[in-house]
Image: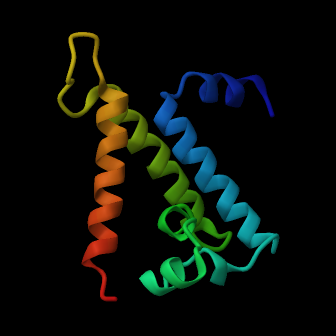
């Protein structure tokens, strides 16, 4: 890892850093067969309720696909849009900013809305 990558990572906002790092870790772990894709995909609420697999609420949003060019484009778009939205987008809720909290709330709300809108 060169100094340019570490500098870039240090200057990312906190929510973007966690979001992108988690996506990279989950995608790499599935592609290197550390665990099976079937353990992270959303199969409906039955796995969560019956088998207490609560990680499925989050991991289904972190996996970006097999290693290919499209996946690298997804990582790039995710990092760029996330950084821009967290730094400049939305409406700050306090005089000191609050954009990270707004962005985190937006992510959680959109995840919840997506899962609720899926058929059971």
Q: Residue at x 69, y 54 (%)?
A: 25
Q: Is residue 32 left or right of residue 64?
A: right
**The one of 72 and 102 positioned closer to us in this rendering:** 102
Picture quadrant where residue 6 is located: top right
Q: Nearer the viewer, residue 50 or 31?
A: 50
Residue 7 x %, y %? 65, 22
Reply above or below: 78 against 92: below
Please indicate whether residue 70 sits to the left or right of residue 107 in the image: right
Q: Which residue is rendered at x = 34% and y = 72% of the image?
A: 115
Taking depth in this image into account, of 2 and 50 the one nearest to the observer is 50
| Quarter occupied by the C terminus | bottom left
**Residue sitting at 55 percent across and 22 percent down?**
11
Residue 97 rendering spot, x and y as whole percentages: 28, 17
Which coloring applies here?
rainbow
Q: Residue at x 44, y 41 (%)?
A: 80
Q: Relative to 40, is 29 on the left or the right?
A: right
Residue 34 lies in what quarter of the image? Answer: bottom right
Choose between 35 and 5: the one closer to the eye.
35
Residue 110, how many percent across, how many down?
29, 58
């Amino acid at each position: 890892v060169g100094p340019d990558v570490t500098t870039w990572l240090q200057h990312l906002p906190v929510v973007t850093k966690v979001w992108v790092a988690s996506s990279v870790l989950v995608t790499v772990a599935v592609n290197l067969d550390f665990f099976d894709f079937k353990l992270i995909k959303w199969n409906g609420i039955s796995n969560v309720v019956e088998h207490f697999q609560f990680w499925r609420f989050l991991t289904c949003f972190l996996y970006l696909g097999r290693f290919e060019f499209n996946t690298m484009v997804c990582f790039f778009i995710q990092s760029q849009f996330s950084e821009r939205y967290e730094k400049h987008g939305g409406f700050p809720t306090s005089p000191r900013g609050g954009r990270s909290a707004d962005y985190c709330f937006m992510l959680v709300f959109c995840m919840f809305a997506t899962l609720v809108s899926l058929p059971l």
